[in-house]
Image (cartoon, rainbow, N blue to C red):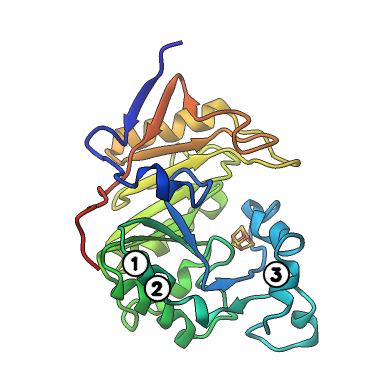
């Protein structure tokens, strides 16, 4: 079967290169940076949260050795309670080669446990590393709106909201109220049709099915509808995966096409 590719090698060259991409298995980013960890499930998209699973297994001992930001007995014993890691704040400054960096893949920067001062420190690092593109994804855009005047919003910061179904489409309205230079939607895990998602003012859409042992199926029509809505609105579209038992189970092709378009090219000549 012939495979068409949209993106990367075309107008929206990712420029990240395979070396840096090896730092993460997430197709739309080059590296992850976690100055915060831990979260609380908030909507259906969280039901099989990968970060929660990892916190209770692989990183459990490491997380429990760090005090939670809200010091209660319950939080001390919960590896997924929000934790702040000041020693990780400078990590992107040490990466001199430009990268796309997923901020807090194991948390949500706007979770209510994190103080404004802690959030501001994360933003300060992004300001100090203009060579990178920071991809910050939240399910709590209300708090981003609350801080839209206090926080710096550098041009290399992409703010996204998770929208797994139309039930939480209101997050897009909040996103549009922020001062983020690049605004995107992550429709992963895609749990229902999003054909009517408002896309005016949106710069990028990522979609994908769920993966893991309890993955909920992703309907072909939902993926096609999202792709077509993006095409109609002229919004770059990235289809991450179909999902299934593993993230690679179903591959990445949607109607035989790989969709890997980014909203902004990564400038490999950008200086720290
Ligand atoms: S918001 Fe993200 S990190 Fe937090 S519980 Fe939901 S899926 Fe997990």
Image label count: 3
Q: Is residue 48 above or below residue 61?
A: above
Horizontally, is 18 left or right of 10 in the view? right
| Separation (CA) of disc 1 from disc 3 | 30 Å
Q: Is residue 230 above or below residue 251?
A: below
Q: Earlier in the sequence, mark 1 or mark 3?
A: 3
Q: Earlier in the sequence, mark 2 or mark 1?
A: 2
The kind of secondary structure element at disc 2 is helix
Which labelled disc corresponds to residue 145? 2
Count neighbours of disc 3 (C-alpha within 10 A) and say few if under 14, some if 14 to 19, many if 20 or more: many
Q: Report which quarter residue 70 is drawn in.
A: bottom right
Q: Residue furthest top?
A: 1
| x, y percent for residue 168 | 54, 54
| Separation (CA) of disc 2 from disc 1 | 6 Å
The kind of secondary structure element at disc 3 is loop
Q: Nearer the viewer, mark 3 or mark 2?
A: 3
Q: Say whether mark 2 is within 8 Å of ligand 1.
A: no
Q: Dividing the image into four quarters, tell me where ligand 1 lies.
A: bottom right
Q: Say whether mark 1 is within 8 Å of ligand 1.
A: no
| x, y percent for residue 101 | 41, 59
Count neighbours of disc 1 (C-alpha within 10 A) and say few if under 14, some if 14 to 19, many if 20 or more: some
The kind of secondary structure element at disc 1 is loop
| Separation (CA) of disc 3 from disc 2 | 25 Å
Q: Quadrant of the C terminus?
A: bottom left
Which labelled disc corresponds to residue 80? 3
Please name the residue shown 33% across and 38% down the image: 261
Contact between marks 2 and 1 (CB within 8 A): the answer is yes
Count neighbours of disc 2 (C-alpha within 10 A) and say few if under 14, some if 14 to 19, many if 20 or more: some
Please name the residue shown 76% across and 60% down the image: 57
Q: Earlier in the sequence, mark 3 or mark 2?
A: 3
Identify the residue under disc 1. Answer: 177
């Amino acid at each position: 079967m012939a495979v068409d590719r949209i993106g990367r090698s075309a107008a929206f060259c990712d420029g990240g290169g395979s070396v840096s991409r090896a730092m993460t298995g997430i197709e739309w980013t080059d590296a992850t940076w976690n100055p915060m960890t831990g979260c609380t499930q908030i909507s259906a998209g969280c039901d099989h949260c990968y970060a929660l699973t990892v916190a209770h297994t692989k990183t459990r001992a490491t997380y429990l050795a760090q005090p939670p930001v809200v010091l209660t007995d319950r939080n001390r014993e919960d590896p997924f309670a929000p934790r702040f890691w000041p020693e990780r704040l400078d990590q992107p400054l040490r990466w001199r080669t430009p990268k796309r960096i997923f901020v807090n893949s194991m948390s949500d920067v706007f979770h209510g446990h994190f103080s404004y001062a802690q959030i501001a420190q994360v933003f300060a690092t992004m300001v100090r590393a203009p060579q990178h593109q920071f991809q910050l994804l939240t399910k709590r855009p209300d708090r981003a709106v609350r801080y839209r005047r206090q926080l710096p919003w550098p041009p290399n910061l992409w703010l996204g909201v998770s929208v797994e179904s139309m039930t939480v489409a209101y997050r897009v309205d909040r996103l549009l109220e922020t001062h983020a230079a690049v605004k995107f939607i992550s429709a992963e895990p895609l749990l229902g049709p999003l054909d009517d998602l408002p896309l005016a003012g949106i710069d990028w859409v990522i979609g994908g099915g769920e993966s893991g042992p309890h993955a909920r199926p992703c309907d072909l029509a939902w993926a096609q509808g999202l792709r077509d809505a993006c095409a109609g609105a002229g919004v770059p579209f990235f289809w991450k995966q179909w999902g299934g038992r593993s993230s690679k189970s179903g591959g990445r092709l949607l109607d035989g096409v790989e969709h890997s378009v980014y909203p902004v090219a990564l400038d490999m000549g950008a200086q720290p």
